[in-house]
Image: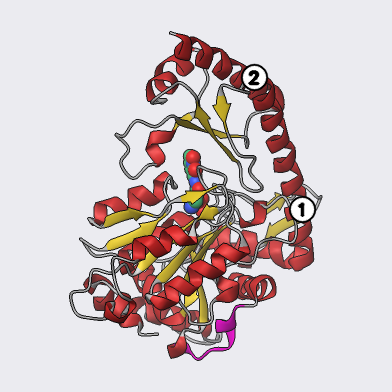
């Protein structure tokens, strides 16, 4: 893979921060090292002394005075070593990426910690997307992705999808405007990246089949595209075996995967990961060096201590409990939709994630219904327009999240939606 062709001029111009390199050198050195280098503050001046966090299973995550001083100090831009190592072992165990054994220049699997996968997405887009670039994605899509991509001045091209994710034949049709042999020609406008949410899609709840992933991957090979696999709902797949990921089939080193702990450990701790070819992940880290410097050391250490005490088995047992919770929530929402919205609305039952994507019949655009009538009744849903590439286009869909409300509250909202739908479509 020639990774240079994918980089923006800004990303290509990034250089290692000398001061960050010194900090990381110091942190890798024995305590006997006397450093007058780093401008790190003296942790003895910090007011925080120790911490003990109670875990629901009765364990505690403890920061004694020595650990607390480390937790409150600067750390490496790519993430604290013990968390990175733990996550790399998990990725290898779950996805067995072909790139794990590649040489660095050939796209060896590399990872970095990011402040939520949102930071990872934002930095990956800013690394790859120039104004005027054609970018492929399946809309409707996560509004945070649109918020990160659209200001870059790129041209978003929608690839049709359905409840099983992106449709490979549709992707082939979109790509037929270009010839594979011409994508490397100077001035070629062929798309270089494709973005998708393969499991429990936001907002549609769609999950991509393994077969479709293989076909999409082969088309990415033909046209030498990178695939951004944004997968925060991977651990919220209700049925096993979990779908094979693009990372698991990445023989070329063309997958950039973003993972998140937000839906399984904590959304407020802001812990995400970018996994991808070393030449590209290293560029994201250079951007982190010059922006946030690193994700909070405190939260990384807190999560790392928990994960090391759980081990992968304990982590996956926790995931099973989380899946059971969201499966019950999903079932409650579907049961209420069947009761109150049959004939008035259309939907597909999601097999992962936390969203139900409903088309309200007889309503051209849900914006007014949601933002005025629903709010009057103290009901909040998301009008589907916010997930579309052109948010001003009328959209008959709403996104309903089954993550926070109780089954009783979900039933109340869908009862309201049914009544409103009847009134609106009969008026
Ligand atoms: C597909 C996809 N990719 C990346 C992210 C970012 O997750 P991170 O790891 O926490 O940074 C997300 C998070 N999605 C949402 C977040 C959110 C936060 C406050 C309020 C509302 C929110 N709604 O509605 C969301 O959908 C996502 O769905």
Q: Secondary structure at mark 2?
A: helix
Label of residue 165 in the image: none
- Residue 260 lies within the magenta run: no
- Pointer 2: what residue? 340
Tell me how many marks there are: 2
- Pointer 1: what residue? 320
Q: CA distance from mark 1 to mark 2?
A: 30 Å
Task: Judge the density around disc 1: few (<14), some (14-19), many (≥20) Cα neighbours within 10 Å.
Answer: some
Q: Quadrant location of residue 37?
A: bottom left
Task: Judge the density around disc 2: few (<14), some (14-19), many (≥20) Cα neighbours within 10 Å.
Answer: many
**316 in relation to 5, above or below:** above
Q: Position of residue 196 (x, y in %)?
A: 47, 58
**12 in relation to 365, above or below:** below
Q: Quadrant location of residue 232?
A: bottom right
Q: Residue at x 53, y 89 (%)?
A: 102
Q: Residue at x 62, y 73 (%)?
A: 82
Q: Residue at x 74, y 50 (%)?
A: 55
**365 in relation to 252, above or below:** above
Q: Quadrant of the C terminus?
A: top left
Q: Over which residues does the magenta segment extend?
A: 97-104
Q: Nearer the viewer, residue 33 or 268?
A: 268
Q: Residue at x 30, y 41 (%)?
A: 390
């Amino acid at each position: 893979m020639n990774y240079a062709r994918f980089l923006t001029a800004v990303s290509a111009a990034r250089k290692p921060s000398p001061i960050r390199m010194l900090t990381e050198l110091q942190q890798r050195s024995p305590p006997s090292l006397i450093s007058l280098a780093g401008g790190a503050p003296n942790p003895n001046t910090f007011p925080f002394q120790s911490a003990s966090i109670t875990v629901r299973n009765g364990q505690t995550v403890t920061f004694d005075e020595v650990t607390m001083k480390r937790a409150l100090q600067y750390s490496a831009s790519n993430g604290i070593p013990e968390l990175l190592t733990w996550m790399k072992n998990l990725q290898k165990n779950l996805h067995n990426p072909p790139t794990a054994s590649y040489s660095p220049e050939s796209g060896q699997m590399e990872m970095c910690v990011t402040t939520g996968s949102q930071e990872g997405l934002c930095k990956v887009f800013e690394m790859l997307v120039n104004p005027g670039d054609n970018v492929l994605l399946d809309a409707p899509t996560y509004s945070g992705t649109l918020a990160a991509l659209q200001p870059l001045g790129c041209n978003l091209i929608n690839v049709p999808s359905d409840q099983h994710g992106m449709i490979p034949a549709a992707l082939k049709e979109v790509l037929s405007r270009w010839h594979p042999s011409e994508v490397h020609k100077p001035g070629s406008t062929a798309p270089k990246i494709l973005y998708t949410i393969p499991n429990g899609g936001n907002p549609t709840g769609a999950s991509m089949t393994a077969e479709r992933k293989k076909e999409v991957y082969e088309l990415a090979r033909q046209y030498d595209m990178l695939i951004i696999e944004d997968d925060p709902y991977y651990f919220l797949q209700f049925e096993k075996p979990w779908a094979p990921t693009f990372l698991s089939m990445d023989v070329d080193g063309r997958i950039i995967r973003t993972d998140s702990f937000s839906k399984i450990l904590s959304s407020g701790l802001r812990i995400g990961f970018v996994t991808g070819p070393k030449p590209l992940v290293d560029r994201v880290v250079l951007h982190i060096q010059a922006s946030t410097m690193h994700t909070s050391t405190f939260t990384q250490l807190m999560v790392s201590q928990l994960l090391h005490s759980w081990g992968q088995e304990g982590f996956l047992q926790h995931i099973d409990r989380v899946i059971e919770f969201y499966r019950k929530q999903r079932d409650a929402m579907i049961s209420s939709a069947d009761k109150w919205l049959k004939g008035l609305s259309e939907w597909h039952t999601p097999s992962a994630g936390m969203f139900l994507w409903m088309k309200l019949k007889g309503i051209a655009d849900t914006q007014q219904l949601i933002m005025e009538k629903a709010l009057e009744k103290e009901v909040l849903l998301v009008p589907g327009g916010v997930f579309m590439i052109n948010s001003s286009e009328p959209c008959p869909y709403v996104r309903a999240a089954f993550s926070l409300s109780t089954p009783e509250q979900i039933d109340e909202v869908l009862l309201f939606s049914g009544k409103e739908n009847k009134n609106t479509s009969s008026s």
